[in-house]
Amino acid sequence: METISLEDINTADKTTSLEMRLMKQDALFSPIWTSVVGPIVDSFSVASCGAYSTYDVFLSIHSGASLLYVGNLNDARKTFAGFVVLELLGSRIGGTNDGPNVWLSYIDPSLRGTQIVFEGAAFIEAEAKKLGAKAIYAVSNNDEIGALFEKIGFSKVVKMVTYRKDL
């Protein structure tokens, strides 16, 4: 699989590109959280089978333990493109502290597989470097997501599957 160098991404020749910004903690009380990001986090937390709740994510961002980045297309409407929640305490699974963990990420389905994904990844990588990170972590048991991580330069560390039995 070919790895794409995120440093080589050039958006100068594109009519639309991605603008990402760090949302301040008080943005959790704004429409961006209540009407856009929050409902997506709700669906993720339900799919996590109890591993975390929307409140866990909200509290982590509000306390400063995690950072919320929101992306918009650089078009006339500033169309919502997606978001990333970086957990600053290291990997939730591995417990290391040499870099943030991509706790949650979402990209609008119409943008998946486009250059916008790589622009967002390059932005998050640059932000992690600003934080002094030596690495970025992400956990997924989804093969499609894993292939995307590998395409943008992540290495598979361990194949982990979580099992659960409801009682």
Image (spheres, helix red, strand yellow):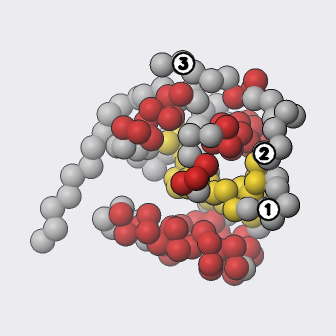
Q: Nearer the viewer, residue 72 or 87?
A: 72
Q: Is residue 26 above or below residue 71?
A: below
Quadrant of the frame with the C terminus: bottom left
Q: Amino acid at mark 2?
A: Ser
**Labels 1 and 2 touching (C-beta < 8 A):** no
Q: Amino acid at mark 1?
A: Lys
Who's the residue at 81% across and 38% down the image? 14
Residue in the picture at 31% in, 65% down: 49
* Nearest the eye: 114 or 97: 114
Q: Mark 3: which secondary structure?
A: loop
Q: Residues within 10 Å of mark 3 (few under 14, many from 20)?
A: few
Instruction: Give coordinates of residue 127: x percent, y percent.
Output: 74, 43
Q: Tell me the residue that label 2 is attached to.
A: 17
Residue 101 lies, in percent from the top left, at: 55, 46
**Camera-nearest label, 3 or 1:** 1
Name the mark on residue 78: 1
